[in-house]
Image (cartoon, rainbow, N blue to C red):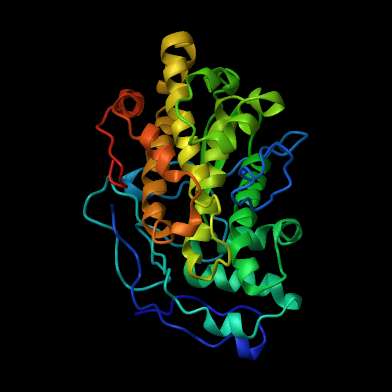
Amino acid sequence: MRNCWSSLALPALLSLAGACSSPIGRGFDGEDDEGETHGASGAGSAGPTEGGPAATAASGAPAGAGGGTASGSSNGGAASGAGGGGVCGNGGPPMNSACYWEEICPDASLDVLAQAYSPGVWFAVSVEMIQRRYPSAACLLSMYADDVGNYADASSFGALATSLMTMVHEETHGYDYEHALWGQTFAYWLRCDLALEVPFVDGFPRSAILAEVAGSGTDLYDGTYLTGQQGTYGFVELLDEWNAYLNGMAAIGSVGDHVDVFGISGTDGALAFAYYLELYLRVARTQEPAVWDAIAAEPALVELIRMQWNRMHFFLEVANQYDKLSIAAADIAVELYAPENLAELEMLLGVSVAAGSCN
């Protein structure tokens, strides 16, 4: 069995090796862009970067987990995922190619890091922490080393672990927009070895789905993302926000045992935006058929949505171990998994859709 992590530039006390006892490999945020970690009193963290993205695009063609392929980029760092050597154990992807899988190690020991922690080494500890638990995101923090401190809470080890959600969320936005070719393609960072590039489908403002929202589960997000300036953003931005919340959930879920608050929207944002996607598809199908046709006509876009649904459930299995990582996830799930809402995904994907990572 391989070590769960590779040591980085930390003091000797912090670079003691650990081993992964049970790797997971089963197939189963606000308008201000401040990147806050929100508990019961606030919504999720930030939206698209103001000023628009840089006109750069990812290149290369790594294999997508679950059997899909897509244009992407190899960003270096700790590569992992189906079809490649992982860094946490010697398992492999499930036989079912419809499943999402990557090697993660949510029980790798962080005790030495916690005991020796001081704010002066917060960045090295952040990268080491995520390398041990969620290695396919370690490169993201390194890529944006000059920016990630804007979203880190270095006051204690527990606060730092909690803020990993916002750090990964915000730098996902940074990557996605930096690598978009505006009006032509949009990029979505998924792992160190996989960034998907898809045709740009602008669609209609997402404020159009506000009237479709049922229940109160997404109250933390509706006013922030479906009204005002954020409400003017279209389809690619909706998928970008889902991606950022999904990656942030994976980060905080992987270190959930060290999160030092109870009642944080760790899983809520990813679920809320999956629900928003269902509503967006409904409005497109019933009121804006040209938009629905444009989405359905792009195989890479349809595959991205399928993969993200599966990825979300893969990481929910980890994050759901910790009740403290949710505020209203159960209420959101009532709407998300309602048959009439799942049907919107099924019509687009052409397969039955269930609450799992093998769709």
> Where does residue 293 sit, x and y in percent of width and height?
43, 15
> Where does residue 287 sit, x and y in percent of width and height?
47, 9
Residue 16, quarter of the rendered image: bottom right
Question: Can see residue 72?
Answer: no
> Where does residue 33 sit, x and y in percent of width and height?
72, 42
Image quadrant where one finds the C terminus: top left
Residue 50, quarter of the rendered image: top right
> Where does residue 197 sit, x and y in percent of width and height?
53, 38
Residue drawn at x 46%, y 16% is 283
Question: In the depicted view, which residue is nearer to us: 62 or 95?
Answer: 95
* Left-right relation of 136 to 157: left
Residue drawn at x 43%, y 80% is 3
Question: In the depicted view, which residue is nearer to us: 272 or 149?
Answer: 272
* Left-right relation of 157 to 272: right
Question: In the depicted view, which residue is nearer to us: 219 or 45?
Answer: 219
Residue 344, quarter of the rendered image: top left
Image quadrant where one finds the N terminus: bottom left
